[in-house]
Image (cartoon, grey):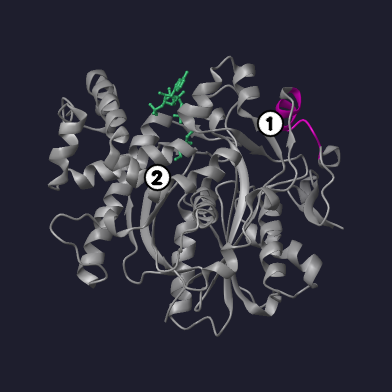
Amino acid sequence: MAAGIDDIAIYIPRLYIDAADFARARGLDPIKLQKGLGVSQMAIVDANQDPACLAANACLTIMQKNKLSPDDIGRLYVSTESAFDESKAMNSYVIGMLEQVYGQGAFEHCGGVETKFACVSGSYALYDNANWIRAGEAEGKHALVVVSDIAKYDMGSSGEMTQGAGSVVMLLNDEPRLLEFDPKVTATSIKDEYDFYRPFGKETPIVHGQYSNLLYMIQVRKALEAYKKKVISSGLIRLKPDETILDHMDYINMHLPYSNMGKKALAYLVRHEWRQLPRWKKILEAIGMDEPRPKDPRGTIESVLADDEFMEKDHEFTKMFTKTKEYQEVYESKLSSSLIASSMIGNLYTASLYLGFRSSLEFEYQKGIDLAGKRVGFGSYGSGSSAMVFSGVIQPEYEQIVKNMNLEVEIGERRRLTWKEYEELHENKLSPEESMLHAKKEFVLVDVQTKTETRGERRYVFNE
Ligand code: COA
């Protein structure tokens, strides 16, 4: 049985900090954010928003748009790394909010859990729900997989430049109009690591940014190797001797903690794939230098990062590689459109990859390209760490969905925060009733209990 993404919806908070304002306040060159990282604006949650209400707002949008009733939904999964409870799943809050609109008990039949593995957990949730459908367990119902996060880093830390917030929800079923997943090729890698983690009770993560960047690329590459084996053994794709698996992906979506990380990761994968092929000779000639090798090629990530000479040469090589006509062609045609939303919105952790997919659909369609039959590859990464590589094919009915996509309209009118407002929100100085915006037709947080016996209970309302 087929399974895939039938529709996709987003909810993005309407407050944002502009990269230029951020750079000025932190004494940074704005070009570092805009060109170096690809960050133009970062969405920031209001005082009456949390990841659960972002998720509920996205769910309500997709249900209303598709005229779905709760009876049409068999599963609702929430994937997040911004959880605020160690036990109660974020799903229950989301269901509670949706039932304010659809009636109490309306989702009683519906199952689901909150999944956690940093930014990759949404991909595991998609895979598990696709298999629920493939197994014939869905009985005609759909699954909702919501990825929702607030990417918030310590004040003054280097991660603070890569914040953002938002939620993406995907409707899955056995007759998907948007993308059918390729069966039996999903591949993973996993390793116990401390590149980025958030200990109990800490609101912001501990991050080793450069280590994490390199680990991300290594782990995704390992998952890509496993994907390649599965694709070849299952007969899904036949590779000619001078081809790489990436040649068979019309689009490639990468996890995007910031927009330029997609560029970096794609260049890494393409470089490793092309190195085995006859075309590499021509590339090396165009670059005019040999590919640098670390002093200890079998060393650890730490030893590679500490090898200054190698790092500098490798950086230079990568820059020249990304300027070659051959790489530019791959970048422009397969990745660039997926980065547009990320630079407008910022880091969405679990939702980053799927916001990228959504962005790619809208902006590729706007180029007048017929997307039907195009294969989309996904490179998902979660710190801690695990990667997942999978793919799917855009369906003939895609246009019904994609023709109406309009990121700016869907985000709505945004408000640029002053630095003082940003600081107040970041340091949680405001209570929900002091929110900066008065949202209409949205779920908002109104209260978090502090009394011992009810501590942590949250109350939400739907603002008419
Ligand atoms: N003008 C133009 N570009 C500039 C610049 C300037 N003035 N200053 C720096 N840059 C470029 C750098 O060359 C670099 O580009 P490159 O990657 O192509 O080499 C980029 O801007 C970033 O600069 P860098 O010095 O590497 O930044 P940093 O070390 O201060 O921090 C991160 C960058 C991404 C490591 C940091 O923001 C971070 O840790 N973010 C969190 C990411 C995360 O959470 N990852 C884990 C989950 S995947």
Distance in Å between CA atoms under marks 1 and 2: 36 Å
Residue 147 lies within the magenta run: no
User: In this picture, which residue range is highlighted in magenta?
Assistant: 420-431
Q: Quadrant of residue 55?
A: bottom right
Q: x%, y% of residue 100?
A: 80, 65
Question: In the rendered view, does 320 fall on the left or right side of 216?
Answer: left
Q: x%, y% of residue 4?
A: 47, 70
**Residue closest to the far front:** 368
Determine whether the residue tagged by mark 2 lies in a helix, strand or loop: helix
In the depicted view, which residue is nearer to us: 369 or 140?
369
Q: Quadrant of the C terminus?
A: bottom right
The circle drawn on residue 217 is none
Residue wearing tag 1: 426
Label whose residue precedes the other's in the sequence (1 or 2): 2
Residue 24 to residue 184: above or below: above
Determine whether the residue tagged by mark 1 lies in a helix, strand or loop: helix
Residue wearing tag 2: 332
Q: Amino acid at mark 2?
A: Glu
Residue 423 lies within the magenta run: yes
Residue at left 15%, top 29%?
A: 290
Residue 399 to residue 421: above or below: below
